[in-house]
Structure formats: structure tokens, C-alpha cells
Amino acid sequence: MSAYITLMTPMTDQECLLAALADLGFDSSKLEVHAAPVNLVGYTGDRRAQTANIVIRRQHVGMASNDVGFLATATGYQAFVSGYDHPRFGSGWLSQLGNRYQTHWTAKQERLAAEERRRLEEERQKLVEAQRKAVHERAKKMGYQVKETREGETIRLVLVKRTY
């Protein structure tokens, strides 16, 4: 029975980890994702004491292999790789996984930043529109006509009141 080797990783984002695993050939059909950690299984089918939230079952790892697992912790995922599987799924593989993770994490951060910029711009547009409507309503109550022109991002409101 191979003992599991626990390897700490700096990976904290499940979505990015799953995408990185897919890049290395473990798509969603080969992965189990659990909210609560489940036991890993050894090469003889025995339940191991190690638990993981993301599991690559042994049939997807290789003949006579053990499950490979990732346990979510506050500081990052712990990778569980058996001593038997360590030559194939050890430091070199985890380094590749880390590189792919970083690529996905960077893309996700850029996507989230773009979404936040879009959200802020939408809020700004709503505020400008609310202020424009308020000026129109108040001017109308006071007997003014509003002439509006737009020049790019600028809105110019001119209040006109005819007195004869």
C-alpha cells in the first residue's frame, strides 16, 4: 500500500484549478467535485484516511494507481498523491498545474476587473440619466424649456425661459 504524500499548493480558486486540470487532460468527466471532502481510494479499492474535495479517481490516473485528490484549505489546496504515483504526478506535474492555474487565475482577475468597470460605468450612466431627468422636471416646473445637446460623453443642458 502506497502512502500518500501531502503537497501544499498556493491554489485557492476552485474554478481555476478545475480549468488547469482540464488543460492537463482531466476534464469534468474525469473529476469528482464535492462540497464536503470524500475519502480517497487506494489501488486495491480500500478507503484511505485522506479526504479531498476534488478527486481524480484511480481509473483515470493509471493502472495500479491510487486516487489523486485536492483538499480545500484556507491557505490553498492540499494535493494528495501516493508514493507510487508521485513520479508521474509529483512536483513536476504540480508545477505544470500551477502554471496553468496561474494563467486561468490571471484571466479570471482580468474578467472580473472588466465586469467591475462595466458595472461602475452602468451605475455612472444611471446617475447621469437620473440627474438629467431631475433637471428636466425641475426646469419644467419653473417654466423653463430645456435644450439638450450631446458632444461625445458630455451632455449640455441649456435652460431657456421666454419672458415677453
Image (tube, grey):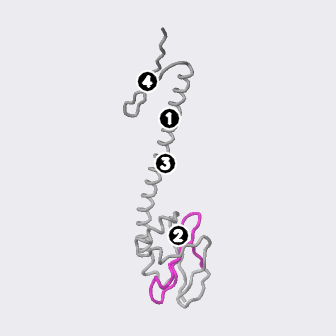
- SS class, disc 3: helix
Q: CA distance from mark 1 to mark 3?
A: 20 Å
| Residue 129 disc label | 1
**Which numbered disc, 2 or 1, marks the residue that appears first in the sequence?**
2
In the image, residue 15 above or below residue 142: below
The part of the image, by quadrant, that contains residue 102 is bottom left
Which of the two discs, 4 and 3, sits closer to the camera?
A: 4
Percent across and percent down for residue 135 are 52, 26
Percent across and percent down for residue 34 are 58, 72
Q: For the residue marked with disc 4, what is the amino acid?
A: Lys
Q: CA distance from mark 4 to mark 3?
A: 34 Å
Q: Answer whether residue 65 is magenta in the image.
A: yes
Task: Identify the residue under disc 2.
Answer: 8
Question: Where does the magenta region start and end?
Answer: 50-78
Q: For the residue marked with disc 2, what is the amino acid?
A: Met
Percent across and percent down for residue 77 are 54, 68
**Which numbered disc, 1 or 3, marks the residue that appears first in the sequence?**
3
